[in-house]
Image: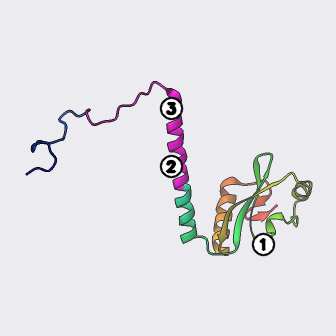
């Protein structure tokens, strides 16, 4: 005996569109808002997954890699620990002047690295970006 109360007949519809939700896409604001929210959610998911990957596989030390920006351009890439990021102990006078005048923006791009990993990342970034005050991993 069938307990659904439909005398043994299937409740499945034979028409493909019967069970689908129909939405109106005439309101572009709603569609754009929905797409924007989905995009934000996906971005957040990948950011959290990336952080988890870094925590598990890379972040094992006290070193970091940082950028010095001047007028939106990367002018120096360095590796450091503790307060190295803010140190004005540099070779190029122009770089020192910019640091002392507060014109340089410092940004740590990766942290909790071992010395070896920090050196690898720093070297690859210097090679790729060729900042003004770096030459072969050394400040000009």
Q: Is residue 46 left or right of residue 119?
A: left
Residue at the far top: name it. Answer: 26
Residue 134 in percent (x, y) is at 77, 59
Which is nearer the eye, 103 or 135? 103
Choose top left, top right, bottom left or bottom right for residue 80. Answer: bottom right
Question: Is any part of residue 4 visible from this angle?
Answer: yes
Few, some or many residues within 10 Å of mark 1 (<14, 14–19, 20+): few
The label nearer to you, 2 versus 3, is: 3
Dominant SS of magenta comes to: helix
Q: Nearer the viewer, residue 43 or 23?
A: 23
SS for dot 2: helix
In this rendering, does residue 57 appear at all?
Answer: no
Which residue is the site of mark 1?
A: 82
- Labels 2 and 3 touching (C-beta < 8 A): no
* Image location (x, y in percent) of residue 56: 54, 71
Query: Which label belongs to residue 30?
Result: 3
Quick one: label 1 or label 2, which is nearer the N terminus? 2
**Tag shown at residue 42:** 2
Of circles 1 and 2, which is in front?
A: 2
Disc 1 versus disc 2: distance between alpha carbons? 34 Å
Q: Secondary structure at mark 3?
A: helix
Relative side of 16 to 126, left or right: left
Specify the segment rendered in magenta. 17-46
How many marks overall?
A: 3
Residue 19 included in the magenta stretch of the image:
yes
């Amino acid at each position: 005996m069938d307990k659904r109360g439909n005398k043994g007949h299937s409740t499945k519809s034979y028409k493909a569109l019967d069970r689908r939700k129909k939405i109106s896409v005439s309101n572009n604001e709603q569609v754009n808002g929905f797409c924007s929210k989905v995009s934000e959610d996906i971005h957040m998911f990948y950011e959290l997954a990336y952080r988890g990957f870094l925590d598990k596989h890379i972040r094992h030390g006290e070193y970091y890699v940082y950028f010095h920006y001047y007028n939106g351009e990367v002018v120096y890439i360095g590796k450091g620990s503790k307060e190295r990021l803010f140190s004005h102990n540099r070779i190029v006078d122009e770089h020192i002047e910019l640091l002392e005048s507060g014109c340089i923006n410092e940004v740590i791009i990766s942290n909790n690295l071992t010395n070896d990993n920090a050196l690898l990342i720093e070297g690859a970034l210097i090679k790729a970006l060729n900042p003004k005050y770096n030459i072969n991993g050394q400040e000009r």
